[in-house]
Image (cartoon, rainbow, N blue to C red):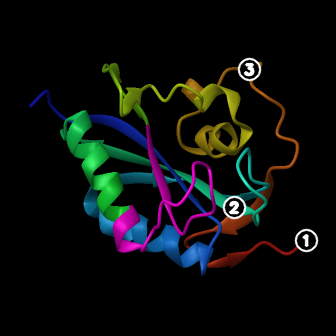
Amino acid sequence: MTGARRVLLALGSNLGDRAAHLSRAVDALGDEVTAVSEVYETAPVGGPDQGPYLNAVVALRTDRPARDLLARAHELEAAAERVRLERWGPRTLDVDVLWIDGEEVDEPDLVVPHPRMFERAFVLVPLADVAPDLVPADGPPAEGVVRWGSLASDGPVAP
């Protein structure tokens, strides 16, 4: 074990009760959670025609190795009954390992830092809520990223 460090996970959902899928995933992460971003609604990026996503970023303090974090992400997705039919297709829950302080991984099925995290407003906007030190000042514009609410309030923000 390398000692506890900050880990950042991205959560997204566009099928079923999107907020409930995100909420259950955060709850399942337990006492390792140190912060949860606001929830943002965004249009899908790539893939087939599909509905909008709710996105959030969760900060953890953990000593879990990268492989264990990936396995945990897959467990959370399975608990939400995610079905993988096509790349970038709609999903009940998507969990990505974005960042592990002091660690880089470059393997076929796991790359940390996430290779596209700094290109995606749907990641950078919620990331700024929990890890502003990682968000570049010249990141992509936040166009199309709408604050939806928080998991604590379990509901959308009034327009």
Q: Which residues are magenta?
A: 77-97
Please report the residue visible at 51 percent of the width from the left and 67 percent of the height from the top. Answer: 22
**Magenta segment main secondary structure:** loop
Which residue is denoted by mark 3 in the rendering?
137
Which residue is denoted by mark 1 in the rendering?
159
Amino acid of disc 3 = Ala
Against 60, is 107 above or below? above
**Residue 113 in the image: x percent, y percent?**
45, 25
Which residue is denoted by mark 2 in the rendering?
53
Q: Secondary structure at mark 3?
A: loop
Instruction: Classify mark 3: residues with Cα within 10 Å, few (<14), some (14-19) or many (20+).
Output: few
Q: CA distance from mark 3 to mark 1?
A: 27 Å
Amino acid of disc 1 = Pro
Please report the residue visible at 15 percent of the width from the left and 31 percent of the height from the top. Answer: 3
**Residue 137 in the image: x percent, y percent?**
74, 20
Can you tell which of label 1 and label 2 is closer to the viewer?
A: 2
**Magenta span has 96?**
yes
**Looking at the image, do the residues carrying marks 3 and 1 touch, with CB atoms under 8 Å apart?**
no
**Residue 6 in the image: x percent, y percent?**
34, 35
Looking at the image, residue 47 sits to the left or right of residue 97; the answer is: right
Instruction: Classify mark 2: residues with Cα within 10 Å, few (<14), some (14-19) or many (20+).
Output: many
Quadrant of the rendering where the C terminus is positioned: bottom right
Amino acid of disc 2 = Tyr
N-terminal-most mark, 3 or 1 = 3
Quadrant of the rendering where the N terminus is positioned: top left
**Magenta span has 31?**
no
Q: CA distance from mark 1 to mark 2?
A: 17 Å
N-terminal-most mark, 1 or 2 = 2
Return the residue found at the far left.
Answer: 1
Q: Quadrant of residue 82?
A: bottom left
